[in-house]
Amino acid sequence: MKTERYDMEKQHKKGKLHAIERISKILDKNTFCESGSNIGGYRNDYNSSESFSYDGVITGYGYINDKLVYIYSQDFTICGGTVGKKHGEKIVSLIKKAIKSKCPIIGINDSGGARIQEGVNALAAYGEIFYYNTLASGYIPQIAVILGPCAGGAVYSPGIMDFIFMVDKISHMFVTGPKVIQEVTGTSCDEDQLGGTNIHKNFSGVSHFVSSNEERCFEKLRKLISIIPFSAYESVNKNIKYQKKIFTNIQSIVPKNPRKIYNIIDVIQEIVDTDSFLEVQKDFASNIVVGFGKVSEVAVGIVANQPNIMAGVLDCDSSDKAARFVRFCDSFNIPIITLVDVPGFMPSIEQEKKGIIRHGAKLLYAYAEATTIKITLILRKAFGGAYIAMGSKHLGTDYVYAWPQSQISVMGAEGAVNIIYNRELKIMEEDEKEKFKRRKIDEYKKIYMSSLIAEKEGYIDEVLDPKETRLRIFKDIVSLQNKQELFHICKKHGNIPL
């Protein structure tokens, strides 16, 4: 690798690594093989005889943990990393190779956007990248790493891809920049306020992983690559054996009182292999947790309500977050483990205005459509439509379990009693009313909320001892590894309520 042709210092002055350094740090040592190094746009199109070296994007392949990946890295020192016709052709060619090779593609974005001097050819380049991103979607993993500006049409390639990594202070994504915002709306803002990591990890949900520096970003990327399959046709569950794990306090994590909070991450850590859990979109819609882990070295996707954030209720953003994750797992046949402790969908005028019906329907649709292995565990409570949406038996889940004393109902007992006995309660004295309510709440819990009722109906397969959870999940995955759906309607595709 001839590093002398790269202007490293220009990037280092900005506190950033060079495009080629980024590739070297992501891949296993000395495994990068460049292709298209002599392809370049010519400045004579702009009254100059010099060429743009490799047209501002370094492309090729290499290995991560001895597994093949294709990778490209935009070089901001070459014409601002802008995308022209040849630049786009190089990226498209790489995506095609990745599709043919059935392996992931990693795109490192650091670009001033479309090369204005090339006019419609620059737009055509973007259009073809989007087209092949879409063809690759659900077939091979696509990972975008934003390590500089990513603006205008450039944002939509990462937007189509599966995961977006960002780094504090150097990553920015926006459709229209601060100057345009100022001109059109009169509002003054800087790049961080408009499209920095705080915006995309906390509010927009665009970013999946945010790191404090580039090296930590690459560590997370390599961990993700080590967990997920390399294509929709890679089997990751062959010749697997159960690995025992000593449970520390799994039975004591979840309080019996349904109103008390706890951290669902503590339950997840007990179920998956030590240090294997990788949370996705950690700071966005934190009332639901999604991420990857391993159970005896078998890759799994985890979807779990988070009781210590908004009581784990489902709202618009958490429904979107979970639905997108479920669809990724299903595309790559990753078993989905759903951990349920949910009081319902968020009751709110604001949520209704935002379209909680439409957003909640995405989650229902994603689970119902998914044909990968689906295993659900109700930890404590599952109420209302959220019980159905969180991977219930009614949506085609293979196995549904419950821990002892878990509750399933249309709603909580207190709310149900207030509705059912509304007339009687209106005419009672306060002392009499409280005694009556307590008695009826106890009756409602016993008659309508016990998981034993759902078990008798076949909606729950077994009530599990918490200590049996990990082993049972593993056994189910092994038993279902050759799973094939028998019922299939021949159609082009469904119409998910986007």
Image (cartoon, rainbow, N blue to C red):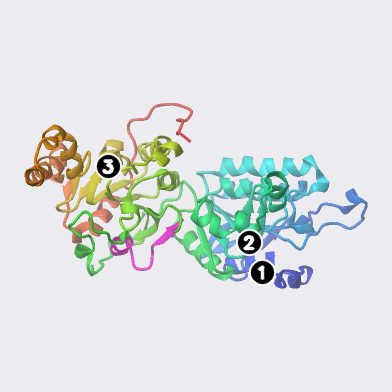
Give the distance between the C-alpha atoms of the residues marked 2 and 3, in whole angstroms: 40 Å
2 or 1: tag closer to the N-terminus:
1
Image label count: 3
Question: CB atoms at circles 2 and 1 under 8 Å apart?
Answer: yes
Q: Is residue 59 visible?
A: yes
Say which amino acid is labelled 2.
Leu
Magenta stretch: give its range.
Answer: 265-282
Vertical placement of residue 2 versus 186, above or below = below
Magenta region includes residue 281? yes
Secondary structure at badge 2 equals: loop
Q: Is residue 71 visible?
A: no
**Disc 2: which residue:** 147
Point out residue 3 in the picture as x, y percentages from the top left corner: 74, 71
**Disc 1: which residue:** 17
Give the distance between the C-alpha atoms of the residues marked 2 and 1, in whole angstroms: 9 Å
Nearer to the camera, 204 or 424: 424
Vertical placement of residue 149 versus 424, above or below = below
| Residue sitting at x 31%, y 37% | 395
Nearer to the camera, 373 or 22: 22
Nearer to the camera, 116 or 257: 257
Point out residue 170 in the picture as x, y percentages from the top left corner: 63, 64
Q: Is residue 128 left or right of residue 200?
A: right
| Residue sitting at x 6%, y 44% | 432
2 or 3: tag closer to the N-terminus:
2
**Disc 3: which residue:** 387
Q: Nearer the viewer, mark 3 or mark 1?
A: 3
Q: Residues within 10 Å of mark 1 (few under 14, many from 20)?
A: some
Residue 364 tag number: none
